Amino acid sequence: MRQLIRPLILFCAIAGVVGSAALTDAPARQKDDKKDPKKDDKKDTKGAAEVGSIEVFMAKDGWRIRVKNAEGKSVVVGTVGYDKQEDALKTVDFLKATFAKGKVSVEKADKK
């Protein structure tokens, strides 16, 4: 009888150790920290709602262009006055294309 109980107890002990090791995460397994793509989409739509506007307005020297942010503050004001509104609108189309596909270059300040 003793010969039957010893292997049974040894088997249960080994099964318990193996079973308890399987319950925890393996060290090589890492949690996935990726964000939910639906939440990222919400951020993008919020950013799209905060887009400013381009205004064409009449000034003393002709039609001018002004870019405003979402809060209504001017961030860019054109320095050239156009005689015709159509010319100012052509410049707006040029600006849109440049902002969409243009390359950004940063000029270094001159050291004095």
Image (spheres, grey):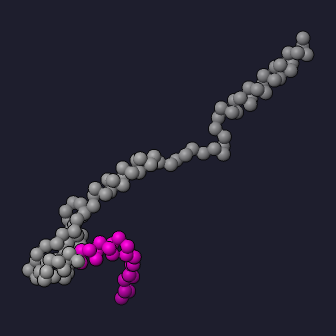
Image: 40 above or below 89: above
Q: Position of residue 105 (x, y in %)?
A: 39, 78
- Locate the C terminus and report the quarter of the image it occupies: bottom left
The residue sitting at the top extreme is 1
Image: 105 above or below 39: below
Q: Where is residue 94 in the image (x, y as percent from the top left)?
A: 28, 77
Residue at the image position 22 percent from the left and 65 percent from the top: 53
How many marks are shown on the rendered structure? 0
| Left or right relative to 87: residue 48 | right
Residue at the image position 66 percent from the left and 40 percent from the top: 26
Residue at the image position 39 percent from the left and 78 percent from the top: 106
Q: Where is residue 50 in the image (x, y as percent from the top left)?
A: 27, 58
Image: 30 above or below 68: above
The residue sitting at the front extreme is 86
Which stretch did the figure color magenta? 91-112
The residue sitting at the bottom extreme is 112
Q: Position of residue 72 (x, y in %)?
A: 19, 62
Image: 82 above or below 57: below
| Left or right relative to 32: residue 45 | left
Determine the image quadrant of residue 75. Answer: bottom left
| Left or right relative to 81: residue 21 | right
The answer to which of 40 and 109 lies nearer the viewer is 40
Magenta-drawn stretch contains 41: no
Residue at the image position 13 percent from the left and 73 percent from the top: 57
- Locate the N terminus and report the quarter of the image it occupies: top right
